[in-house]
Amino acid sequence: MYRKVILNNGIRLVTERIPTVKSVTIGIWVNVGSRDESHEEAGYSHFIEHMFFKGTASRSATDISREIDALGGEMNAFTTRETTTFYVKVLDQHLPNALDLLSDIFLHSRLGKTEIEKEKQVILEEIRMVQDDPEDLVQELHTQLVMGKHPLSRPILGRESTIVQIRRQDLLAYIDRHYRPEEIVLAVAGNFDQQRLEKTVARMFGRYRTSTTHVSRKRWPPELCGGVTMKRKPLEQVHLCIGLKGVAASHKDRYAVYALNSVLGGSVSSRLFQEIREKRGLSYSIYSFLSGYSDGGTVTVYAGTRAGEVERVLDLVGRQILKLARQGITEDELRRTKDQMKGGLMLSLESSHSRMNKLAKDELIAGTHTTLENIISEINAVTEQQICRVAESLFTTKSLALTGLGPLSSKQVGMVSKKYQECLL
């Protein structure tokens, strides 16, 4: 059963009671991410996420770790380009203790100067880890190419130059500006007593305030950039990203785009997986994925292959993209992808953690709850004609972008760039 309550200070509590499970997951979602940072603040959202686990007025970092382990639960956090999330999952009997722990780290983090200096080194190592992972790195480079100068192009982890200069007062000011009650959603899914939960949440979070006057949200839709960027690096493989225009997370055609992505490269039965890996053995890892933001989105194909096969792989990917743009998908593909989408949805929502994620995203994106029945109905309503229209609209050369990383010669870089542009014209 779904319920939404707005506290007196503007914090939204969205819940779904599932009496058939023995777990409960609580998430605190803040509507702020890397796109909301200034150039000088790059990495602040992610840094704050780390710092909330480094001690409060009543608990040390060690106390926090031991307490969640003693509950037999899981506590973590993550930062995206648009949100920062802190969550805990426990057995339903431990809900009061879990709420007390989660509210303490969120409301009473010390952000100690010594801990900040130590955490700078941890974040710098995380940035270096991305530099050492070619699959992560090529996707980061690709986002920068596609998004151009838009704030969505900024790496979530920030840059070394901004991380080393972080001061405690900078983080406190950032929290005061962005962690406003009206930008906070508490999402709870699992087995719990609704009345008791609401009273506890009101007591713990109802007095939360920020001191700054209202700061208007400064977000604007991205204008996707096309182009080609090839970066030479001594690796065993060449890692490739091919990008096209997508849709926003709440777009009316989003389910058609989900289906289109599934057919292109979103599953093991997809055209790209079957054509490039299964039939020709040109790649171990090849897939496509969607990035949907509040006001825009992208479709990205990733592939890893040996240097001598780059042009061939790109040609095959280009042909499949063009084929979808011109012909859409078949009736059999539509039936299979609908079954896959519905099956994946049903399986994912067996978890209280997944239900919590859905509750929060529904609230942040649309301000309302979308039932499972409504989603199934939306999926069933997708047609071949709709997918054909969407593919023709999105899969164009205007926003086509190509990023490569690996052992390519200068001559090969030029040839790849020229040939790939030509094959899609």
Image (cartoon, grey):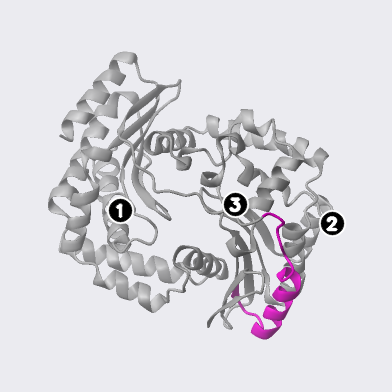
Point out which mark residue 59 bears.
Answer: 2
Which three-letter amino acid code belongs to the residue tagged 2? Arg
* Depth check, front residue: 325 or 94: 325
* Magenta-colored span: 189-212
**Within 10 Å of the Cα at label 3, are there few (<14), some (14-19), or many (20+) other Cα atoms?**
some
Q: Which circle, 3 or 1, is nearer the viewer?
A: 3
Q: Is residue 165 left or right of residue 150?
A: right
Residue 47: give x, y in percent of width and height: 66, 43
In this picture, is 272 found above or below 332?
A: above
Residue 35, image x, y percentages: 51, 45
Nearest to N terminus: mark 2 or mark 3: 2
User: Of all residues shown, which one is farthest toward the right?
Assistant: 58
In-image side of 4 versus 74 (left or right): left
Identify the residue under disc 3.
78
Local packing at callout 2 (Cα closer than 10 Å; few below 14, some 14-19, many 20+) is some
Residue at left offset 72%, top offset 65%: 208
3D distance between C-alphas at marks 2 and 1: 46 Å
Could you give the CA–CA distance between mark 3 and mark 1, rounded to whole angstroms?
Answer: 25 Å
